[in-house]
Image: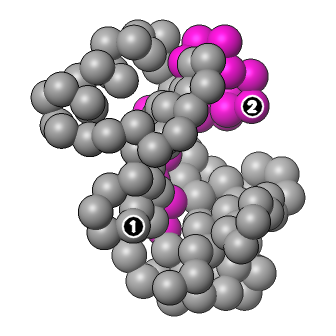
Amino acid sequence: MIKGLAWLGVRTERYEELVEFLREGMGLSIDHGSTDFSAFELPDGSTVEVFGPSDRDHTHFSTGPVAGFLVDDIERARRDMEAAGAEFIGPIHHWENQAWSHFRAPDGNVYEVTYKPS
């Protein structure tokens, strides 16, 4: 079911410092962003997103960085994972041709499943 890692998101009170580290220390370029939000696209097509303190859409990112696991069929993945004990947080979100859904795994941490066309 899982094909790889597609996305990593982190909410931080030290937004400026982390963005600077990703740019200067890791050599990543900002793909797009706004106030307290930066998205970096990596060479393999995966994405790292950083959310600052004024972001209110990701307050459930309370356990640390959130990894997004790449799947072919997000609806099926969600059904299978719910049956295995994952607690999903809200609906499946769609943007352009991508989709994602956050969940809390049995270990208490937040993750997501992600669909991105090849």
- Look at mark 1 in the image and give the residue it sits on: 45
Image point (50%, 85%), residue name:
118
- Look at mark 2 in the image and give the residue it sits on: 57
Q: Looking at the picture, does residue 65 appear above or below residue 87?
A: above
Image point (59%, 87%), residue name:
72
**Left or right: residue 42 compared with residue 1:** left
Number of marks drawn: 2
Location of residue 109 in the rendering, given as x and y in whole percent from the top left corner? 52, 45
Rate crowding at label 2 as few (under 14), some (14 to 19) or many (20 or more) other CA atoms within 10 Å: few
Magenta stretch?
Answer: 52-69
Image point (40%, 62%), residue name:
46
Q: Residue furthest left?
A: 25
Q: Residue furthest right?
A: 91
Location of residue 82 in the rendering, given as x and y in whole percent from the top left corner? 72, 72
Location of residue 11 in the rendering, given as x and y in whole percent from the top left corner? 52, 27
Closer to us: mark 2 or mark 1? Answer: 1
Color scheme of the displayed model? one colour
**Left or right: residue 24 compared with residue 75:** left
Please check the rendered image and state whether residue 67 is part of the magenta-colored stretch, yes or no: yes
User: SS of the residue at dot 1?
Assistant: loop
Judge by depth and name the residue closer to the eye, 69 or 40: 40
Rate crowding at label 1 as few (under 14), some (14 to 19) or many (20 or more) other CA atoms within 10 Å: few
The answer to whether any part of residue 80 appears in the image is: no
Q: Amino acid at mark 2?
A: Asp
How many angstroms separate mark 2 from mark 1 (CA)? 24 Å
Image point (23%, 23%), residue name:
21
Q: Looking at the picture, does residue 14 appear above or below residue 77?
A: above
Please check the rendered image and state whether residue 44 is part of the magenta-colored stretch, yes or no: no
